[in-house]
Amino acid sequence: MTTADFTVVDTPIGPFTAIAAADGAVLAAGWTADAENLRQLIHSRLRPADLRRRDSLGAVSTAIIDYHGGDLTAIDAIPVRQHSGEFLTYAWEVLRKIPAGEPVTYTEYAALSGRPAATRAAANACARNAAALFVPCHRVLRIGGALGGFRWGLDAKRWLLDHEA
């Protein structure tokens, strides 16, 4: 893939950028206005050589706006494309099935991903997720409810969890 489209949407947390392939699948997304930095998060097999800014990415932009406006399921039908090994790919699919307002611990997430003893691997899946929001890694917490980490900052993670509660 040579060129992918991106857009920046204003949200209550700050600017949110999404990069999408020609077929509309999200390749990367997060609370930043720096599309080039976001492009670097995309696996080298999928990473576009160039980015083209658009005012809107259609359904992707609508989902971002609707989610932040209160429709917590708006992101569910948007296709996502990430590349990695078998476990990470499956773990990202599992993240998409964790319902809004029902966060899980890293230990619970590891079990849901089929590797109950692999809490660190589950945390790694969250850390390597390039498509934040659409693959909602913010829904995974430490035991006891501590936030843990989040590429886009703990204030953003807290806002998302409160928004979904």
Image (cartoon, rainbow, N blue to C red):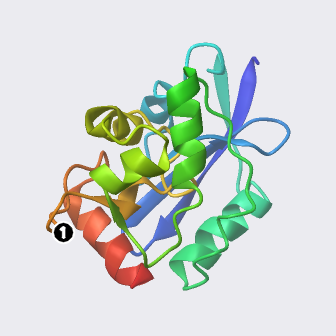
Q: Quadrant of the N terminus?
A: top right
Q: Nearer the viewer, residue 39 or 90?
A: 90
Location of residue 20 in the rendering, given as x and y in whole percent from the top left corner: 70, 41
Q: Is residue 4 left or right of residue 126?
A: right
Q: Nearer the viewer, residue 113 or 134?
A: 113
- The residue indicated by pointer 1 is 145
Residue shown at 75%/43% (left/top)?
25
Residue shown at 43%/40% (left/top)?
34
Residue shown at 68%/64% (left/top)?
76
Location of residue 110 in the rendering, given as x and y in whole percent from the top left corner: 38, 45
Above or below: residue 14 compared with residue 130: below
- Say what amino acid the circle numbered 1 marks: Gly
- Residue 32 visible? The answer is no
Crowding at dot 1, Cα within 10 Å, few <14 / some 14-19 / many 20+, comes out as few
Q: Nearer the viewer, residue 19 or 10?
A: 19
- Residue 85 visible? The answer is yes
Above or below: residue 2 compared with residue 102: above
Above or below: residue 1 compared with residue 123: above
Q: Quadrant of the C terminus?
A: bottom left
Location of residue 33 in the rendering, given as x and y in whole percent from the top left corner: 44, 48
Q: Nearer the viewer, residue 45 or 126?
A: 126
Q: Secondary structure at mark 1?
A: loop
Q: Is residue 136 left or right of residue 45?
A: left
Kindly give the residue lying farthest to the right in the view shown. Answer: 23
Residue 83 appears in which quarter of the rendering?
A: top right
Above or below: residue 132 compared with residue 85: below
Q: Is residue 147 left or right of residue 14?
A: left
The count of marks equals: 1
Residue shown at 51%/40% (left/top)?
91
